[in-house]
Amino acid sequence: ACENCGGSAMPESCLHFAQPFWLLTLFLLPMVWLWLHYSRHLKRQGLESRYADAKLLPYLTGEVRGSQRRSSRVLTAWMLTWALFSIAMAGPRWDYERISAFQPAAELVILLDISASMNISDVRPSRLARAKQEIQDLLRLNPGIRMGLIAFATVAHVVAPVTEDMETLERVLPSLSTELVRLPGSRLGNALEKAGLLLGDDSKISRHILLITDGDFDEPKLLEKVDELAAKNIHLHILAVGTEVGGLVPERFVYTAGGRTPVSRLNIPQLKKLADHGKGLFQVADYHQKDVQKILDLVIAEADQQQMQEMPTRVWNERFYLPLIPAIFLIMYLFGRGNRFARKSS
């Protein structure tokens, strides 16, 4: 069955069973046969033999010669059927194709700003709603990149670690809102630190961070933190949401100056500087699919999917169906017309 069986080939490349413990059920067959054989002998030597002639005994017990032959054929058919089903359940297989397993050679952590300013509706319905729309497009278009999600305001929270499960990210996305924020302000530095921890130190993988924000933060030593990530070959891309005209911050956790609510505007110069230091792409969202497509193209262009030659995968040619073919014909015989297991027509 396998041309590799000879010589120094590995024995598992030849005929073997995926679940060999099912073959233990074959040992029930001789046990059943022995029980039927000796029970039949005991039955013939029962008390009725004292009162009936030996020639008439088979007719008395209903075991005439023709019936015995028919019962023997049925028993043999049942035992063969049992054996074939046991072999099929054991999963006979031979021959395999060797396929190299692969993993996406790029990881992307999304930093979503959920501070009070993201509730401004200078873009409809709000900056945060538009940001979520961009993330949904990103998850839908994802060609196999592993992604993680961090939501941040004054404190950064890991919503989802780096994973290939896009459905999990999509399920948690609607629950993110500015209502989760208890203190005013926005601190990007803490979010960048956590993103760096999620991405790790694997230099063989292309690592990227996507920051979706309006840039309404003023934090010291922010460029230094971005430079540290860039030194580790972690790129920072920025997708800006909002307008330079801006709008009033509608949240209750906002300190007012002179009774006036502060205005939040899209801080393009600061965000461009961060993207330059992070060796990444900066763009203002126009809320079309091409926004995230540009980022995905950039990530994929840097790192193609790497083959993991040290972890090959074998795809076996399963042959469990071969013993099932004769087993089906035996079942048809056992329950066919003229057999004692067939349904008698009224």
Image (tube, rainbow, N blue to C red):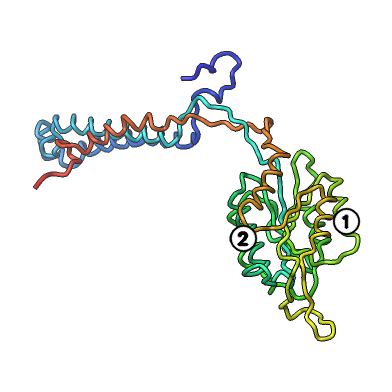
Given the image, on which type of amino acid does mark 2 rest? Answer: Gln
- The tag on residue 223 is 1
Classify residue 124 as left or right of residue 220.
left
| Relative side of 134 to 56, left or right | right
- Disc 2 to disc 1, C-alpha distance: 28 Å
Left or right of residue 241: residue 165: left
Residue 338 horizontal side relative to residue 36, left or right? left
User: SS at mark 2?
Assistant: helix
Identity, as a three-letter code, of the amino acid under mark 1: Leu
Give the residue displayed 58% in from the left and 27% down from the top.
Answer: 98
Q: Is residue 174 above or below residue 232?
A: below
Q: Kindly identify which numbered label has been placed on residue 295.
A: none
Q: Is residue 215 above or below residue 281?
A: below
**Label drawn at residue 133:** 2
Residue 21 placed where, x, y %? 48, 37
Taking the spot 69% from the left edge, 72% from the top edge, the residue there is 119
Residue at 70% over, 72% down: 120
Local packing at callout 2 (Cα closer than 10 Å; few below 14, some 14-19, many 20+) is some
Circle 1 Cα neighbour tier, 10 Å, few/some/many (<14 / 14–19 / ≥20): some
Out of 310 and 27, give the one closest to the viewer. Answer: 310
Question: Is 227 located above or below residue 124 in the figure?
Answer: above
Q: Quadrant of residue 265?
A: bottom right
Closer to us: 27 or 132: 132
Furthest toward the bottom, the residue is 259
Among the 4 quarters of the image, the one containing residue 245: bottom right
Residue 215 position, x and y percent, is 78, 63
- Which residue is at the front of the view, 9 or 280? 280
CB under 8 Å between discs 2 and 1: no
For marks 2 and 1 on the same chain, the one whose residue lies earlier in the sequence: 2
Q: Residue at x 40, y 35 (%)?
A: 86
